[in-house]
Image: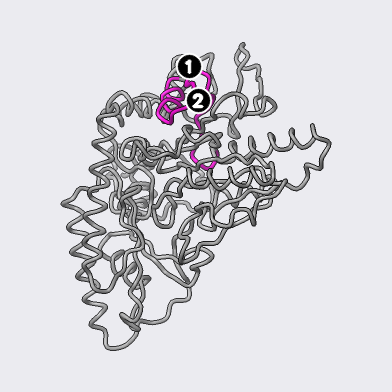
Amino acid sequence: MWNDSEAVPTFSRDGESTVASRTSIPEHESLPSTARQIIRDEISLDGNARLNLATFVTTWMEDEARELYADAFDKNIVDKDEYPETAAIEERCRRMLAELWNAPDADTAIGTSTTGSSEASMLAGLALKRRWQRARRAAGKDASRPNLIMSSAVQVCWEKFCNYFDVEARYVPLSEGHLTLDGHDLDSYVDENTIGVVAIMGVTYTGVYEPVAQIAAALDVIQHKTGLDIPIHVDGASGAMIAPFLQPDLLWDFRVERVQSINTSGHKYGLVYPGLGWVIWRDRAALPDDLIFSVSYLGGDMPTFGINFSRPGAQVLLQYYTFLRLGREGFTAVQQTTQDVAVFLSSGIAKIGAFELWSDGTDIPVFAWRLKDGHTDKWTLYDLQDRLRMRGWLVPAYPMPDGFADVTVQRIVVRNGLSRDLAAELLADIDREVAHLDALQSPMPQRDDGSAFHH
C-alpha cells in the first residue's frame, strides 16, 4: 500500500499525481523532494534566463560564486554585530567604488549597498530634496514645491521617486536633434525649485550615454546667468560599471564637479546575481545628516540610511568576490568581450535590409533598432518579437518615450554569458524569421496588447 514516504515514486505522490495547491496553504506536509519537484516542474515553463535579452540583470556566475552565495544565504546585512566581517566587506566595496568613480577622497566619500538601483535612486533623490529644502529654509524661502529634471527616457524608478516623495517630475522630451538629455534648452526647465538634474549613463531604451559633462556645462551657464547652483545625480545603473573600464577618459563621474552622487546596479554590469545596488555620494556634505539613522541593534549602535532594513548580505559578498576575482584587468576583459558581442550583433542587424539601427552598443553593450520606413505593411517588430520567442529568445519590442512615442524599437541587452557563438545563432534566427515575415501575403492580425516589456 502506497504512503507518503521516500518509497513512493516521485510522480505518484500528492502534488505530482494531483494538482498542487494554488490558493491556500495545504492541510498536510509533503516530502522536501516532492515540494522541490513540484516547483521545478512549474518554473520549467519560464523562459531560459540565458536567452532573455530583455533583462539587464546578471544571469550567470561562476560555480565558485554560486557556492559562496549558498554559504551566505542566511546572513542579514543589518546584523552588523553578528556579522562584522560582512559589514567590513560592504565598506571595502563602497570604498572601491568611490575610487573607481574618482571621488575626490575615496576615504571620506559616503555610500551604502541597497537592494538595487531603484532603492539607490530613491536615496539619492531624497538627499537632493533634503539639501534643497535645508537651503531654502535657511534663506527663509518656501520649500514646498521641489522639482527634478530628467529625460523622458528615464527609468521608471525616477517616476516612482517623484510620485512617492512629492517632487514634480520635469521631463525633457527627445527630438531628432537631441536624442538624449544633452543640456539643450535646459534653462526652460530649471528654476529656483529645482533640486537637481538626473543624467543617465546608459539609457534603458537604447543603451546610449547622456553627456554628463555637457549637461554640467549647460548648468554652469545657467548659474552664471541666474545664480542657481543645480547639482547632478548620475544614474549609472548600467554604465557606471562599464565606462570606467571601456571609456576611462570619458568625463561623467566625480571628476565633473556638479556630480554629487552616483548609483549603480551590482546585479547588472557589476556581474552579481540580483538584487544589489550601490549609491555613493561625493562627500559627507552631499548626504544630509538627517537621512542617517542611528539604531540600537543587537547591543550596538548602528548608523543606517537605507529604505529597506533587513536584506540579504550574500550579494555584497558576491560583489567583493567579483572585485577580487577579476580586478580591473578582468573587469575590462569581461566588459570588452560583452561589448564586442554587442557590436557583432548590431553590425549583423544593420545588414538586414528591414532594419535601421537606433544605437550600436558602443556605449553600454545594449543597442536598439527600428523597421525602415516603408519596408513592410505586413508585420511589425512585435510580430518579430513573438516569432523569436517561439525559438526561446526574449527580444523586446516597445514604443520610444515622449518625442518619439510613435516609433517602435527592438532592443538587445548583451550580458556576460552571451557568447559570440550563441549570438551568431541569434542572428541566424532573426534573419530566418524576417524572411518568413517578409514572405507573408497578407498582414499579420492586429495586436491590441502592445508590448509586454515596460521600463
* Residue occupying the point 43% across, 52% down: 20
Identify the residue at image location x=31%, y=68%. 356
Identity of the residue furthest to the bottom in this view: 441
The front one of 18 and 309 is 309
Residue 189 left/right relative to 92: right
Numbered-mark total: 2
Looking at this view, is 273 or 357 the one in front?
A: 357
7 and 52: which one is in front? 52
* Residue at x 33% of width, y 47% of height: 40
**Residue 15: where, in percent of width, then height?**
39, 49
Q: Position of residue 319 (x, y in %)?
A: 38, 29
Quadrant location, the N terminus: top left
For the residues bearing labels 2 and 1, Cβ distance under 8 angstroms: yes
Q: In 3D space, how far apart are the residues under numbered discs 2 and 1 (Cα atoms)? A: 8 Å
> Within the magenta stretch, is there residue 26?
no
Q: Position of residue 307 (x, y in %)?
A: 60, 34
Disc 1 marks a residue whose amino acid type is Tyr
Q: Which residues are magenta?
A: 92-119
Residue position marked by numbered label 1 in the rendering: 83
Structural crowding at the residue carrying mark 2, measured as other residues with C-alpha within 10 Å and reported as few (<14), some (14–19) or many (≥20): some
Q: Is residue 326 left or right of residue 249?
A: left
Characterize the local packing of mark 1: few (<14), some (14-19) or many (20 or more) Cα atoms within 10 angstroms: some
Determine whether the residue tagged by mark 2 lies in a helix, strand or loop: loop
Residue 119 is left or right of residue 96, and the answer is right
- The image shows residue 366, relative to residue 118, as above or below, that is below
Residue 103 lies, in percent from the top left, at 48, 27
Looking at the image, residue 374 lies above or below residue 78? below
Which amino acid type is marked by label 2? Asn
Residue behind mark 2: 76
Quadrant location of residue 110? top right
Q: Which SS class for mark 1?
A: loop
Identify the residue at the far top of this view: 299
